[in-house]
Amino acid sequence: MNPLPARRALAEFLGTGLLVAVVVGSGIMATNLTHDVGLQLLANSTATVFGLAALILMLGPVSGAHFNPVVTLADFMLGRRSAGGTDWKAVAVYIPAQIAGGVGGSILANLMFDLSPVTASTHVRASGHVWLGEVVATAGLIMLIFSLVRTGRGAIAAPAVGAYIGAAYWFTSSTSFANPAVTIARAFTNTFAGIAPGSVAGFVGFQILGAAIGIALVAALYPAAMTHPVSEFEALTDPAEQVPVKAR
């Protein structure tokens, strides 16, 4: 399967946008329903687990369901030697689509709850322990995705990635953004899931650091090169092929 670049870009735009709409929208709904912060986080994380898994299943066969610039970059870096993974042309298409889609998803969530389309967040997230949480969350995400890819278990990526993100909501100090496009988008909503614009650069920088650590660990633990170039989830559409197949 070799979808046209426009189809892949559309899938990444929609997937990232809907993912942000799930994260932001469920956060708004949670705060409308309860003042208990623990219950708010539980509602937000639960919606994200199921929403992310569903989006990976829905759009993975088209673009690989990256929805995340560091996943796209990791796929490019880890696939270079084998001529597999995402090529530089796809990187140049995917990342802008992910960022634009994410911002659109934030605006959509605001509008669904009768808020102004853009409400700059005032939620400051800028401290060393929170940045460390982003390093851990992002490194773990990259390790999970590409350990599945390199061992031919990509067909279970949707539930695995959803489960990991749900867990990382609770075990990391940052609630596991682990995604530069989603981080940028969440600056556009002054709601439960928001992040102050001044905190975005720090988060993105430590997400990139976490991704670099994750890439290095994948290369050390799973040195075998990927054998399939674009759609990590193609095994979902053709299980007989048994090719490595990937996702937030």
Image (cartoon, rainbow, N blue to C red):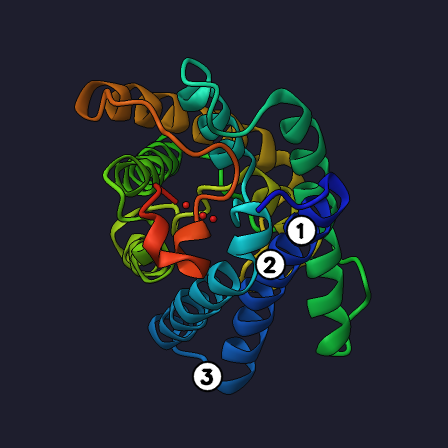
Q: Is residue 168 left or right of residue 76?
A: left
Marks 3, 1: nearer the viewer: 1
Q: Is residue 229 left or right of residue 8?
A: left
The residue that appears at 66% across and 44% down in the rendered structure is: 98
State the mark number for residue 20.
2
Between residue 11 and residue 109, name the one nearer to us. Answer: 11
Q: Which residue is mark 3?
A: 34
- Counting residues from the start of the chain, the first of labels 2 and 1 encountered is 2
The residue that appears at 29% across and 39% down in the rendered structure is: 140
- Counting residues from the start of the chain, the first of labels 2 and 3 encountered is 2
State the mark number for residue 206.
none
* Residue 79 quadrant: top left
Q: Which residue is mark 1?
A: 102
Q: How far from the left and from the top, in percent, is residue 119?
A: 75, 58
The residue that appears at 61% across and 42% down in the rendered structure is: 181
Query: Which residue lies most toward the top here?
Result: 81
Q: Please, what secondary structure does the residue beneath circle 3 have? A: loop
Q: Please, what secondary structure does the residue beneath circle 2 have? A: helix
